[in-house]
């Protein structure tokens, strides 16, 4: 199930297994130097949307081997994702062979899109403008996208803070 509630495009269970197998194969092929990179704090681009569309090899080349790799099952087979979790509040969600969603959450401490994760909904709105959608427990903004529409979903806690962000392709 897609964590932000967005469903991916159509695919097959076999495709999911192939993607998962491919992900594990790439992880096994990375060098010891690349594995050492995962112990240092990752710094994402200020706009994580630039990571959308990376294939598994590009993700591993850029960030090293993930701390863990797992599948998130949806209610339908085409909703399954492979997740590269890098720890520290950063994860990449892959459908088929491409990153379609990025998760940034506490304890990630560097600014993302002009604010720090864990800030208030109002502070995020001062950096991004008014949200285009307000849901129970979440707010969304449209972001500029070059190849596809991009959205940002902020998960809002009881205190009105945003401890978790999802940047995702809105065409999924």
Image (cartoon, rainbow, N blue to C red):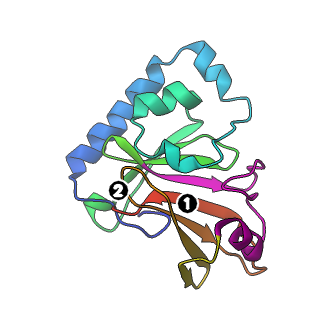
Query: Residue 165 is drawn in which quadrant?
Result: bottom right
Q: Is residue 168 left or right of residue 137?
A: left
Q: How far apart are marks 1 and 2 (CA)?
A: 17 Å
Image quadrant in which the N terminus is located? bottom left
Numbered mark located on residue 80 in the image: 2
x%, y% of residue 96? 30, 45
Q: Which residues lie in the magenta part?
A: 100-128
x%, y% of residue 61? 51, 25
Q: Is residue 33 magenta?
A: no
Query: Residue 166 is drawn in which quadrant?
Result: bottom right
Callout 1: helix, strand or loop? strand
Q: Which residue is drawn at 73% across and 49% down?
A: 108
Callout 2: helix, strand or loop? loop
Image quadrant in which the C terminus is located? bottom left
Q: Which residue is drawn at 50% across and 29% down?
A: 60
x%, y% of residue 137? 62, 80
Q: Around disc 1, counting alpha carbons within 10 Å, would you say few (fewer than 14), some (14 to 19), or many (20 or more)?
A: many
Q: Would you name the residue on which mark 1 appears?
A: 166
Query: Viewer-nearest of labels 1 and 2?
Result: 1
Q: In this view, does 80 lie to the left or right of 160?
A: left
Q: Residue at x 29, y 46 (%)?
A: 16
Q: Nearer the viewer, residue 89 or 128?
A: 128
């Amino acid at each position: 199930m897609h964590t932000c509630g967005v469903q991916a495009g159509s695919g097959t269970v076999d495709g999911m297994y192939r993607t998962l197998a491919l992900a594990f194969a790439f992880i096994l092929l990375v060098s010891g130097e690349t594995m050492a990179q995962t112990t240092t704090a990752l710094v994402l681009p200020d706009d994580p949307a630039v990571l959308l569309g990376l294939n598994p090899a590009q993700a591993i080349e850029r960030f090293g081997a993930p701390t863990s790799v797992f599948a998130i099952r949806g209610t339908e087979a085409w909703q399954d994702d492979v997740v590269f979790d890098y720890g520290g509040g950063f994860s990449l969600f892959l459908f088929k062979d491409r990153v379609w969603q990025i998760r940034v959450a506490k304890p990630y401490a560097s600014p993302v899109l002009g604010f720090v994760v864990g800030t208030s909904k109002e502070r995020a709105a001062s950096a991004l403008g008014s949200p285009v959608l307000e849901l129970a427990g979440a707010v969304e903004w449209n972001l500029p996208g070059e190849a596809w529409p991009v959205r940002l979903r902020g998960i809002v806690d009881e205190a009105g803070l945003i401890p978790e962000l999802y940047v995702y392709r809105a065409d999924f």
